[in-house]
Amino acid sequence: MSDEAKINALGKAAAYQLADVTKTKPQFGLLTPKWTTKFLEFKGLDAGIYRVNRVKEGNTPLEVLCSSKPKSDIVPQGFVDYEAKPREYILNSISTIININTQVADVFSSPYDQTKEQLALAVESLRERQESQLINNDDYGLLKNVPDSQRIQPRDGAPTPDDLDELISKVWKEPSFFLAHPRAIAAFERECTRRGVPPLTANINGGNFILWRGIPLIPTDKLLVDGLKNPKSKGGKTNILLIRTGEAKRGVIGLYQTGLQGEHSRGLSIRFRGIDDKGVASYLLSLYCSAAILADDAIAVLEDVDVGEYYDYNKN
């Protein structure tokens, strides 16, 4: 006989029927903060096409005269030439359809609106895919478009302060942020600890990040480790990016479509498709995005970083 059965009073199971239950919104563990899209500057497009016009590279854009006696010298003549076939970026579409039973939404929408919560989770899923595409897309993804001259290898496998300094030498004109998998950041912190140079931290855009040379290391699980977001093994290889962002800085920028019908947020629209004869409401969610690297030195990558190096500090 249970202890509750021995008590001459109302039991827990019966009392539960009269109790209020405090509930949460739907929790989806795979959602991330998506810091990449929060730190990257974006430019809205009217027609979905972005052309990057570049000047042909040389030692200087144009020869100039520098003399204390200009009248005795010939002023050089010339012009600044442009690339004849500049690259154009066409926005990529990421879409999904969400179906909602109107009878369920009518009856079971307190305290949380079922339609609103379903759409909110769908939007978060699209934003997750957007961040992944910005980094890994075969056409415009940042990893694929890093110039060969901006690719380096780690000295000893694990990411060291020296390696990140080398990245800074590649993106030395106002670098904005490092981008790395959380395990790569942890591996870098271990290397800093071993060398006795723990990095500083700062609160930026509502998050706490470690800094190296004043540049924040921003975490994302879209920079995969051995092709996985969440690898099970302790070891693995990944990449670390250093990015300068902003059109005015000739950096890396995200692209999105403006003026969408049913615009919900930056580059994303939600359109009601109607209700079928079974009472199921349908919504189309479409997100339009791309990314452009305006100058070769706006990005660099540390490739094949080993995240599995650990140290036993108790050994002599």
Image (tube, rainbow, N blue to C red):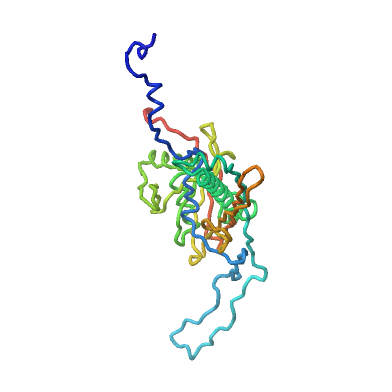
Image position of 185 with respect to 250: above or below: above
Task: Indicate the position of residue 126 as horizontal and vertical percent values.
Answer: 56, 48
Q: Quadrant of the C terminus?
A: top left
User: Dividing the picture into quarters, in which one does residue 83 lie?
Assistant: bottom right
Q: Residue drawn at (40%, 33%), measured in percent from left and top? A: 21
Q: Residue drawn at (40%, 53%), measured in percent from left and top? A: 205
Image position of 164 with respect to 234: above or below: below
Q: How many marks overall?
A: 0
Task: Indicate the position of residue 220 as horizontal and vertical percent values.
Answer: 50, 45
Left or right: 169 with respect to 193? Answer: right
Q: Quadrant of the N terminus?
A: top left
Image position of 306 with respect to 89: above or below: above
Task: Indicate the position of residue 19 as horizontal and vertical percent values.
Answer: 38, 30
Q: Residue furthest left?
A: 8
Q: Residue drawn at (41%, 41%), measured in percent from left and top? A: 189
Nearer the observer, 179 or 74:
179
